[in-house]
Image (cartoon, rainbow, N blue to C red):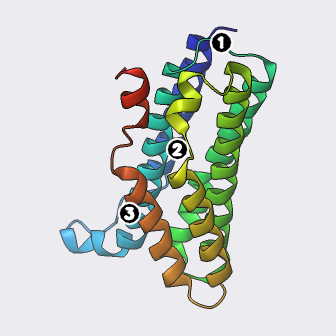
């Protein structure tokens, strides 16, 4: 399999995941804008998840622009990441309907931390294949944001039984942290 085919597969899966999320919305029976008000929690959880998926798509793109080859381990690491991302629509729907109940908030965080772990594994697999002095290794560097994300997600999971709203706040913080463009790949390999 070529690198381009793997990228196209990832693009397609993430696009499908994003599409599935919007299909969770049901049209209100009320024909005024007031009929949209009850959808606000679902919409906010949708926006958060959409941003996360867009961040993963963007970073996935940059990741594969900085590599030249793939192998079986990379394919499986990529599938592992896509598995956790495929669970985002379910967790998003449950979170949006839960009024910040503990279990949906915790499940959302668990899926986010597992996706982050899967992304970390994918990055490490690519670095292992390309070497410690490769453009990808130089671009990733110490990976402060990746490691900080894992700590934030773990904190949110621990808080979810006690202060679910704080956990959601942490998820928003992680999204905001990654929403700020990551220039590591552009600085070390050029923009693609």
The residue closer to the viewer here, 13 or 154, is 154
Placement of the C terminus among the 4 image quadrants: top left
First along the sequence among labels 1 and 2:
2
Res 12 seen here: no
Q: Is residue 21 above or below residue 174?
A: above
Lateral position of residue 52 relative to residue 2, left or right: left
Query: Which quarter of the image is occupied by the N terminus?
Result: top right
Which one is closest to the eye, mark 1 or mark 2? Answer: 1
Label 1 sits on a secondary structure element that is: loop
Residue shown at 63% from the left, 91% from the top: 162
Which residue is situated farthest in the front direction here? 133
Q: Which residue is drawn at the image coordinates 46% and 28% (left, top)?
A: 62
Circle number at residue 43: 3
Tell me: residue 87, above or below residue 99: above
Rendered view: 164 above or below 178: below
Whether residue 93 is visible, yes or no, is yes
* SS at mark 2 in the image: helix
- The 10 Å Cα crowd at callout 2, few under 14, some 14 to 19, many 20 or more, is some
Q: Position of residue 45 (x, y in %)?
A: 45, 64
Residue extending farthest left: 32
User: Are the residues flagged by discs 3 and 2 in contact, CB closer than 8 Å?
Assistant: no
Can you tell which mark lies on residue 20? 2
Question: Which residue is under mark 1?
Answer: 69
- The CA distance from mark 3 to mark 2 is 14 Å
Front residue (pair 105, 139): 139
Residues at discs 1 and 2 in contact (Cβ within 8 Å): no
Horizontal and vertical percent position of residue 170: 49, 72
Mark 3 closeness class: few <14, some 14–19, many ≥20 residues within 10 Å: many
Using the numbered discs, state the Cα–Cα distance from disc 1 to disc 3 in whole angstroms. 39 Å
The image quadrant that residue 39 belongs to is bottom left
């Amino acid at each position: 399999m070529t690198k381009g085919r793997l990228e196209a597969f990832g693009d397609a899966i993430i696009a499908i995941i994003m599409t599935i999320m919007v299909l969770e919305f049901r049209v209100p029976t009320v024909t005024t804008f007031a009929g949209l008000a009850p959808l606000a929690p679902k919409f906010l959880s949708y926006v958060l998840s959409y941003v996360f998926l867009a961040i993963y798509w963007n970073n996935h793109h940059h990741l594969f622009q900085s590599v030249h080859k793939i192998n079986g381990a990379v394919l499986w690491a990529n599938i592992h990441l896509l598995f956790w991302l495929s669970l985002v629509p379910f967790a998003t729907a449950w979170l949006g309907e839960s009024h910040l109940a503990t279990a949906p908030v915790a499940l959302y965080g668990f899926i986010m931390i597992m996706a982050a772990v899967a992304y970390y594994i994918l990055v490490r697999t690519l670095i292992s294949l390309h070497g410690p002095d490769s453009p990808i290794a130089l671009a990733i560097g110490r990976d402060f944001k990746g490691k900080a994300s894992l700590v934030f997600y773990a904190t949110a999971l621990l808080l979810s039984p006690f202060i679910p709203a704080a956990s959601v706040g942490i998820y928003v913080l992680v999204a905001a942290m990654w929403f700020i463009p990551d220039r590591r790949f552009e600085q070390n390999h050029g923009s693609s």
